[in-house]
Amino acid sequence: MFDIYFSPSRAFGRLKEKPNWLVPLVIVLVFNMLFVFISSQYIDWGKQRQAALERMRERNVPQEQIDKATEGMDKFYSSPTMRYGMPVVSALFIGVVALLFLAVIYNVSLPLFGGASDFKRTWAIVCNASLIAVPSAIVRGVLVLLKGSAEVTTSLLVVAPNLKQPFLKGLLAQLDIFDFWKFMLIAIGLKVVFGLKGSKSYTLVFAVWVVVMLLLALLGMGAGGR
């Protein structure tokens, strides 16, 4: 497994004959959920509640609806199962969906770049490349513990922590060093396993990454405006 970090071409070379994905997938999901569980211990729920109320008031939501929403938030925050369990379950669901999305997009796009579609191998590449979740969770987990706050980042947002513009803030938040590492590994994997020529695998992978970043930044902008 450690070859994925230090000798990725060798690691992906083995996937040609035996596209293993289950163990990497389990490891990725476990570390993602572990990080979410740790960080959820340091979320400022009072701040989250106040921000939600301010957004509703900005939208001129009727006071009756605000009261109902406040009651629901208070019940959520007072329940350890909801406060800590729900984020972990969400991390599991979102993690699987995100990996499936990438695998499907790359697999469908492969013929356009000179490769042959093979979902099992594409899925194995994405799952193995996503093992970057291990060092990512460790680094971010340590930052959470040192800072005593869930508000940590390994993205370019670190250079502009007080940025207010929703779209730019969302975009910088997506430019994460560990995401870059992961997508580099996916590009290497597609090149090795499917024999894509030249820079085709990098073009495919980073084009998808750019589109995903823009979509997430736009969604973040919409969320910030609600």
Image (tube, grey):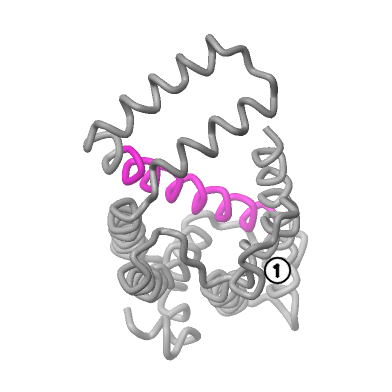
Q: Position of residue 177 (x, y in %)?
A: 56, 76
| Residue at the spot of label 1 | 206
Query: Magenta part mainly helix, strand or loop?
Result: helix
Q: Position of residue 42 (x, y in %)?
A: 33, 55
Quarter holding the C terminus? Answer: top right
Q: Position of residue 30 (x, y in %)?
A: 28, 58
- Answer yes or no: is residue 190 visible: no
Q: Residue furthest bottom?
A: 6
Q: Residues within 10 Å of mark 1 (few under 14, many from 20)?
A: some
Q: Residue furthest top?
A: 64
Which residue is located at x 32 percent, y 38 percent? 86
Q: Nearer the viewer, residue 187 or 159?
A: 159
Say left or right for 71 vs 38.
right
Q: Nearer the viewer, residue 139 or 6?
A: 139
Q: Quadrant of residue 196?
A: bottom right
Q: Nearer the viewer, residue 98 or 165?
A: 165
Say left or right for 151 vs 161.
left
Look at the picture and state if 90 lies above or below 169. above
Quarter holding the N terminus? Answer: bottom left
Which residue is located at x 67 percent, y 55 percent? 170
Q: Give the magenta part as a residue range.
A: 86-111
Say left or right for 135 vs 34.
right
* Magenta stretch: includes residue 90: yes
Look at the picture and state if 10 lies above or below 216. below
Which residue is located at x 62 percent, y 62 percent? 173
Q: Quadrant of residue 155?
A: bottom right
- Answer yes or no: is residue 3 visible: yes
Q: Nearer the viewer, residue 176 or 46?
A: 46
Amino acid type, mark 1: Phe
Which residue is located at x 28 percent, y 58 percent? 38
